[in-house]
Image: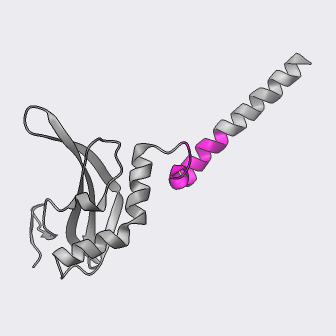
Amino acid sequence: MKKKAAMIGSALLLLTVGGVTALNVINPNWRENTIFATARDKQLAWLKEHEKEIVAWMHSAYPKVESVQFDWNTLKVRPVSNGVSIIGYNLLVKGTFNDIPETIIFVDFLMETADSIPKMSQIRMNQPPSIKKDDGGGYGFE
């Protein structure tokens, strides 16, 4: 009887682990609003939720930018240093704008910790919108 219960328990555990793994492969965004959400998941969910506000802010700074197509896979959080110590963190997302694939745009948020959720009051652009050159560089879009 104990062997049968152990086999059933093992099978259920294996099915559960396999199901969660399959769910993660099929739909990696399932964790965004669960207890399994990582800091990156929460930051990405916040960015997607505030996408229209971010685009409106970019349009106010650069009126020729009508629409932005973010590449959410480029989300990065990096430390900001004064050369001696880390003074904050920068969240960066890359994308294109105005449905032109040769363009490039970056949006940055200054954060206190690497796990912080961004705030609209901390939005900035470290680089202006630009158009890609053939040599890998870019020139300003104005």
Residue 27 lies in what quarter of the image? bottom right
| Percent of width and height locating residue 138 | 10, 66
Magenta stretch contains residue 12 = no
Locate the N terminus and report the quarter of the image it occupies. Answer: top right
Count up the numbered dots. 0
Location of residue 89 with respect to 6 vertically, above or below? below
The magenta segment is 18-35
State the scheme by which the image is colored. one colour
Considering depth in this image, is 138 or 46 the residue closer to the camera?
46
| Percent of width and height locating residue 77 | 28, 46
Q: Main secondary structure of the magenta part?
A: helix
Residue 109 lies in what quarter of the image? bottom left
Query: Which residue occupies 81% across, 22% down?
Result: 6
Query: Which residue occupies 29% across, 49% down?
Result: 76
Q: In this view, does 92 lie to the left or right of 84?
A: right
| Percent of width and height locating residue 55 | 29, 73
Considering depth in this image, is 18 or 36 the residue closer to the camera?
36
| Percent of width and height locating residue 124 | 19, 61
Q: In this view, does 22 lie to the left or right of 16?
A: left
Spot the residue most to the front.
Answer: 121
Magenta stretch contains residue 22 = yes
Query: Which residue occupies 33% across, 66% down?
Result: 70
Location of residue 92 with respect to 36 vertically, above or below? below
Locate the C terminus and report the quarter of the image it occupies. Answer: bottom left
Location of residue 97 with respect to 26 vertically, above or below? below
Q: Is residue 48 left or right of residue 121?
A: right
Residue 89 lies in what quarter of the image? top left
Spot the residue most to the top.
Answer: 2
